[in-house]
């Protein structure tokens, strides 16, 4: 309230000062015109130009300097005349000069005020620093007061004394000396009641009282002005009285005073008097305040419409709305504004009401209504714009105020609602309102609004959030157009919008790329990459572009793009993204689709050379090895089998950790077999177990190797392979080891074979199998002369009672003992065997044969030399020995072993014949010839049958030999013996059987002889 | 008793050979007999079998090309004939050291051919490795697919080397049935039967020899001896005469023939003629061995007997009698 009062005070002060200045300037002008003719060029130089602030400031300074110089000259001249001692002025002139001097000082005071006001202006300070420094309005005003007081004191009847007093009051006011000022003004009212300055004096006194909140006194002075309806300050007096009532809490009286001001102003207007006296606008504006205190909102529009009459009432109603707003009377506002729009639907000023109504809804948080109101406002505005006359050609189009209002309000509200919606996560109708309102803004906004890019971006964000992806994409993309048109777009917004346009496009088609969309994507992504080469999504977009081509199976297009991302960009070492790895994978996939395994291999090798980390290295190694492997397979498919063999082997050795390595090695072996390099293939298979012991093909490969070496007769190699096969094929381990031992034996490495057999025997549980293996070991040990090993095995036979081996050893020992003529040992060892009926017949036969031989030996050593007295005894002993031998031979024969039987029979025949021969040749000493002849005759009875038995036994031996087909010469020997015994002459030459001679193949000269 | 111990050793070897892995112990390396026969056919056709040393060719190690040549599993390689020729020559030379690598090369290059294994058997036999020799010849037989006379014969030879005469005879018997021209096989069988006084069997095999080699002196002499025991002295005299005609250096044949004439045929003239023929051969050094009888006295006695016998009647000279001049001219 105070502020408004102060504003009016200033307006009145300027009004008064303007009157004073007018008179002074006119005087000065007259004075200057006498001294110097005004220069037209200077006038032009001093004319202010719109917009040229610096120039205007300098021009103001020049003007002020000119005026100051003139004023200084005036003061100096006046003082010179007043102080002229030689020719002092007369009294009349002196009073006139003092009056002029007072004015001159006041003018100088204005000069000083200029410099004081501009003391902070660098421009002016640079020109007149000294003047600025020394500027003092106060000094000049004090000089003026002193001059006016000298005039009042010295010339009380000066004809312009009312003016002098008024000016003195003014000077005191300038100095802030309200008391002296009021004294001067009351002096004026009292002493010069007829002066035209009296209403002004009342006004000033009232102002001073008002200022000092002495409203009663103030009202008295303001009311005094009502006596001077012709005075210029009359409407001011009414106006100030209204305010004084208001301050005296009498708004109703105040409102009436204002109504008077309005009525007076209407009269002034109607009579076309000075419009400065028409204070209707000020009064109507202040009425809003007073009205809000004393009247109801629903009547407001009608009231102001009545008060304003021909004037536009809406601004004053809007003032009232503003006051209601201060008191948060939103319902009253809604009521008033609706009434305004109803009452003045076509008034251009209704734009304010439209806008305010929208804001009022916003304040009431009725955002849907606010949005609708803005939409209505927009329609209203459109209608208004349409109603405007079309601009002429070249004429600048000025948009109506409503456009700006809609633009501004919609911007603020849409952004606000969007923000709330985002923060609260709903409700959707708020988003709907925000979107609609954004659209209003964007409908009208131009790039003159620096915020347009940001708002457009926000709108795009809202669309995106509301899944309106395609439109979002389009709006994001518009930001680039703004930038191209020179709009300042925040760097981050520009970047995010560029990417948003692409991302929204991608969302809009759910990643199903039509050709049109793909083209658009290419355009947008190109733009992004061009504008933001180091942008966060530059790589992703390059990837995406390649990926779309990939998905559409345009591999030739996609491949170089993926390669660039996966191998070139990553090579810079500045980027880390999953897209790089994906690009690598997809590039490799394309190569795989194209079966370009070499390409995959080389590419993967490059990646491996960069030493990737973690699981990636395993992954790439796998790809590398698979590609490498496939490349070799291609070589194989092309028929370069030898090359494939080498390559498979190199692969396997270079990539031993790869699961494909054993397969490669296996393939190499199989190719070698196919190529005809059977030995090479077998060797490769043999190495396979050492290189890749866990290979699934290991068993097959080793089997093949063993078969191949065996088929080649390379048993020493087959034996080694079988040892490995035994490790691989555990269920047949024992079998393969035994075959391996067999092969070692057949290859000449009998010692090793014997050792292996023994080990195998140790592991066997089946006794028969164990014995069979030990038998083989024993045979080999004996064959290779390894007596130590043989002894060990035989000891085991004996120790463990392994039959018939243990017994066979005893028999052999018996035979050896007999050969060494250790007959007792031989006999006793054999005796051990004979009692074991369960032994094989051949062993029993051999043992018994040894015994027979021992007994035969005893028989032979039984001498027949004796004297007559002992002949009977000796002969009996000999015969007894014979019988023992005979019995032993016969029992050995009875076991049925053909060889032993033949031998036994022959030996028995020998014994019989020997007996006959021995008895026949007995020497008897000490008896007569007659007795000898008698003895011979007697013994002949004994000898002949024995001789016949001998021949018979020999014949039996021959028959047995023939029956047994003993083809080692026994038959012939026996036959010769039989013939000899039967006194048959030799009819056949002794036949020597020669080994059959060796035959070798030879190509028939007449034959084609198989293949060439 | 010594003989029984030495036969024991051979018996052990035989038993080992029987228990060691038989050919193709690892199974699948060998095709069925039918397939094997088909594959090996080309390697057997057009070949004849000659006694080692009679095949010609030069014993030499495989060439560098043969060492590196690829295996041929479908058809005979270009190397196989040369290698076969070398192997036969090495066997003839008893050059086992060279024969082994040649045989290995054959076995490697022509993996379906039986010859690599056969010559490895020969090589093993030559070095006394009987078990290996048996195994290899059995491998050769496997590769041949069908029963092959030569391989059976080689098998029999090895048994013979192992003193397994019965087994040897069995194999050789089968071999000569398949391959009658293996006269050494018939001769082997004939000599065994002959020694064992099996006259008919011996005569049969000697005859088989003579059916192939009519002038085989061993067969002629052997059959001659058999004929005596069969009381076919004239035949015997004729055979001995042919034997001496084929090979006059054998003293015992001269004496045997003389004895047949003198004792069995009571033909002193032919006996005299025979002894004179012996004397001439001795004089010429054709017969190196000195006779145990007093040849001069024998001739004198026979001359006397002939003179005395001529008085009453003129003796008829046997057409089969061998005249010294004939013997000389036949030599």
Image (cartoon, rainbow, N blue to C red):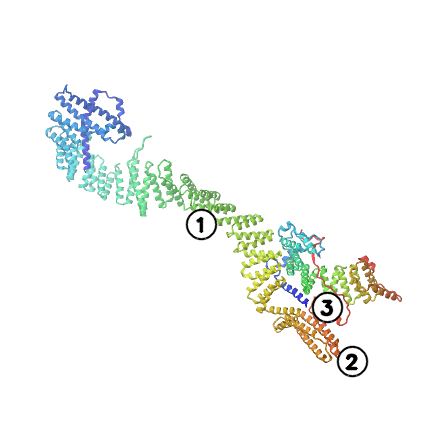
Q: Chain of mark 2?
A: A
Question: Which chain does tag 3 point to?
Answer: A
Residue A60 image position (x, y, % from top left) = 25, 27
Image position of A330 with respect to A391: above or below: below
Question: Which of the two labelled residues, at mark 2 and mark 1, occupies the earlier sequence position?
Answer: 1
As drawn, the residue found furthest toward the front would be A926
Pointer 1 or 3: first along the chain? 1
Residue A930 is tagged as 2
- The answer to whether tags 2 and 1 share a subunit is yes
B79 shown above or below A446: below
Q: Secondary structure at mark 1?
A: helix
* Tag 3 and tag 2 share a subunit: yes
Q: Position of residue A453 (x, y in %)?
A: 34, 39
**Mark 1 = which residue?**
A614
Q: Which residue is mark 3?
A: A973
Relative height, residue A952 to residue B53 (above, below) = below
């Amino acid at each position: 309230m105070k502020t408004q009062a102060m504003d009016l005070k200033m307006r009145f002060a300027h009004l008064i000062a303007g009157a004073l200045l007018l008179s002074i300037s006119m005087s000065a002008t007259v004075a200057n015109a006498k001294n110097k003719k005004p220069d037209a060029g200077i006038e032009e130089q001093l004319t202010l130009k719109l917009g040229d602030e610096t120039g205007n400031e300098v021009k103001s300074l020049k003007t002020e300097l000119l005026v100051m110089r003139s004023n200084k000259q005036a003061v100096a001249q006046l003082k010179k005349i007043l102080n002229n001692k030689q020719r002092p002025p007369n009294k009349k002139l002196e009073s006139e000069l003092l009056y002029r001097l007072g004015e001159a000082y006041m003018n100088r005071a204005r000069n000083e005020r200029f410099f004081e006001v501009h003391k902070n202006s660098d421009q002016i300070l640079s020109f007149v620093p000294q003047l600025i420094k020394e500027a003092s309005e106060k000094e000049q005003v004090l000089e003026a007061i002193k001059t006016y007081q000298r005039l009042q004191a010295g010339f009380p009847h000066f004809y312009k004394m009312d003016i002098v007093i008024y000016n003195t009051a003014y000077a005191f006011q300038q100095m802030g000396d309200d008391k002296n000022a009021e004294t001067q003004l009351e002096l004026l009212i009292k002493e010069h009641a007829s002066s035209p300055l009296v209403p002004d004096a009342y006004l000033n006194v009232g102002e001073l009282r008002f200022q000092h909140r002495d409203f009663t006194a103030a009202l008295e002075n303001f009311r005094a002005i009502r006596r001077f309806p012709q005075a210029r300050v009359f409407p001011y007096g009414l106006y100030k009285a209204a305010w004084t009532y208001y301050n005296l809490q009498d708004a109703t009286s105040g409102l009436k005073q204002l109504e008077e001001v309005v009525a007076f102003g209407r009269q002034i207007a109607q009579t076309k008097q000075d419009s400065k006296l028409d204070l209707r606008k000020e009064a109507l504006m202040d009425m809003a305040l007073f009205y809000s205190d004393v009247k109801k909102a629903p009547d407001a529009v009608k009231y102001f419409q009545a008060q304003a009459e021909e004037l536009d009432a809406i601004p004053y109603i809007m003032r009232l709305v503003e006051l209601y707003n201060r008191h948060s009377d939103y319902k009253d506002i809604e009521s008033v504004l609706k009434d305004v729009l109803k009452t003045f639907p076509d008034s251009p000023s209704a734009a304010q009401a439209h806008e305010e109504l929208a804001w009022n809804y916003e304040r009431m948080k009725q955002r849907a209504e606010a949005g609708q109101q803005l939409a209505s406002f927009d329609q209203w505005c459109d209608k208004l714009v349409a109603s405007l006359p079309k601009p002429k050609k070249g004429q600048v189009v000025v948009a109506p105020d409503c456009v700006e209002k809609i633009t501004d309000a919609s911007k603020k509200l849409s952004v606000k609602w969007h923000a709330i919606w985002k923060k609260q996560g709903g409700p959707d109708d708020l988003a709907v309102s925000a979107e609609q309102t954004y659209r209003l803004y964007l409908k009208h906004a131009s790039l003159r609004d620096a915020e347009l890019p940001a708002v457009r971006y926000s709108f795009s964000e809202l669309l995106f959030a509301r899944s309106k992806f395609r439109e979002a994409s389009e709006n994001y993309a518009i930001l680039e157009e703004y930038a191209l048109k020179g709009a300042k777009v925040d760097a981050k917004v520009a970047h995010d919008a560029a990417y948003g346009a692409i991302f929204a496009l991608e969302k809009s088609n759910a990643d199903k790329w039509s050709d049109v969309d793909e083209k658009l994507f290419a355009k947008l992504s190109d733009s992004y990459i061009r504008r933001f080469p180091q942008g966060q999504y530059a790589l992703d977009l390059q990837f995406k572009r390649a990926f779309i081509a990939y998905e559409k199976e345009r591999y030739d297009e996609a491949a170089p793009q993926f390669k660039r991302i996966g191998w070139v960009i990553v090579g810079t070492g500045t980027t880390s993204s999953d897209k790089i790895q994906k690009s690598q994978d997809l590039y490799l996939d394309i190569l795989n689709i194209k079966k370009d395994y070499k390409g995959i291999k080389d590419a993967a090798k490059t990646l491996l050379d960069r030493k990737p980390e973690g699981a990636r290295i395993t992954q790439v190694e796998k790809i590398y090895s698979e590609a490498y492997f496939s490349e070799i397979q291609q070589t194989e498919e092309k028929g370069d089998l030898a090359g494939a063999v080498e390559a498979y082997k190199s692969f396997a050795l270079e990539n031993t950790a790869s699961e494909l390595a054993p397969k490669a090695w296996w393939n190499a072996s199989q190719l070698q077999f196919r190529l005809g390099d059977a030995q090479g293939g077998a060797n490769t298979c043999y190495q396979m177990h050492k290189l890749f012991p866990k290979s699934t093909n290991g068993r097959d490969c080793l089997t093949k190797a063993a078969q191949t070496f065996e088929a080649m007769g390379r048993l020493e190699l087959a034996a080694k392979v079988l040892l490995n096969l035994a490790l691989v094929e555990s269920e047949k381990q024992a079998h393969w080891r035994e075959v391996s031992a067999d092969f070692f034996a057949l290859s000449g490495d009998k010692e090793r074979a014997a050792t292996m057999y023994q080990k195998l025997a140790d592991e066997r549980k089946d006794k028969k199998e164990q014995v069979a293996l030990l038998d083989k070991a024993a045979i080999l040990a004996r064959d290779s002369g390894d007596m130590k090993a043989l002894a060990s095995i035989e000891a085991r036979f004996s120790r463990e009672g392994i039959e018939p081996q243990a017994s066979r050893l005893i028999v052999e020992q018996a035979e050896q003992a007999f050969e060494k003529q250790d007959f007792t040992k031989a006999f006793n060892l054999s005796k051990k065997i004979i009692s074991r009926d369960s032994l094989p017949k051949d062993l029993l036969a051999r043992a018994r044969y040894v015994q027979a031989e021992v007994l035969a030996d005893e028989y032979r050593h039984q001498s027949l030399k004796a004297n007559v007295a002992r002949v009977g005894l000796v002969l009996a002993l000999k015969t007894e020995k014979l019988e023992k031998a005979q019995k032993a031979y016969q029992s050995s024969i009875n076991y049925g072993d053909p060889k032993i039987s033949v031998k036994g029979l022959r030996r028995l025949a020998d014994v019989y014949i020997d007996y006959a021969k021995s008895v026949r040749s007995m020497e008897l000493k000490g008896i007569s010839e007659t007795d000898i002849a008698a003895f011979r005759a007697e013994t002949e009875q004994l000898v002949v049958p024995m001789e016949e038995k001998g021949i018979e036994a020999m014949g039996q031996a021959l028959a047995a030999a023939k029956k047994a087909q003993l083809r080692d010469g026994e038959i012939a020997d026996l036959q010769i013996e039989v013939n000899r015994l039967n006194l048959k002459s030799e009819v056949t030459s002794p036949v020597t059987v020669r080994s059959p001679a060796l035959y070798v193949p030879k190509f028939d000269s007449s034959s084609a002889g198989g293949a060439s | 008793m010594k003989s029984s111990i030495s036969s024991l050793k051979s018996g052990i070897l035989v038993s080992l050979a029987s228990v060691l892995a038989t050919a193709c112990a690892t199974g699948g390396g060998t095709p069925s007999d039918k397939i094997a026969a088909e594959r090996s056919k080309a390697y057997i056709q057009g070949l004849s079998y000659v006694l080692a040393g009679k095949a010609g060719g030069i014993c030499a190690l495989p060439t560098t090309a043969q060492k590196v040549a690829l295996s041929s599993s479908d058809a005979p390689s270009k190397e196989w004939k040369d290698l076969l020729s070398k192997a036969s020559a090495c066997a003839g030379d008893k050059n086992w050291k060279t024969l082994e690598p040649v045989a290995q090369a054959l076995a490697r290059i022509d993996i379906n051919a039986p010859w690599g294994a056969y010559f490895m058997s020969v090589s093993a036999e030559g070095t006394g490795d009987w078990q290996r020799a048996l195994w290899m010849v059995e491998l050769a037989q496997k590769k041949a697919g069908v029963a092959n006379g030569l391989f059976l014969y080689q098998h029999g030879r090895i048994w013979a080397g192992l003193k397994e005469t019965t087994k040897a005879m069995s194999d050789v018997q089968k071999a000569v049935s398949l391959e009658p021209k293996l006269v050494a096989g018939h001769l082997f069988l004939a000599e065994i039967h002959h020694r064992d006084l099996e006259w008919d069997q011996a005569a049969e095999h000697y005859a088989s020899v003579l059916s192939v080699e009519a002038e085989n002196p061993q067969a002629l002499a052997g059959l001659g001896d058999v004929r005596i025991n069969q009381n076919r002295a004239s035949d015997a005299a004729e055979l001995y005469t042919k034997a001496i005609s084929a090979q006059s250096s054998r003293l015992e044949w001269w004496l045997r023939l003389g004895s047949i004439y003198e004792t069995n045929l009571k033909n002193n003239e032919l006996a005299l003629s025979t002894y004179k023929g012996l004397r001439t051969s001795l004089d010429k050094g054709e017969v190196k061995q000195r006779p145990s009888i007093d040849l001069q006295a024998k001739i004198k006695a026979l001359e006397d007997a002939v003179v005395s016998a001529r008085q009453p009647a003129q003796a008829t000279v046997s057409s089969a009698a061998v005249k010294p001049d004939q013997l000389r001219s036949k030599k």
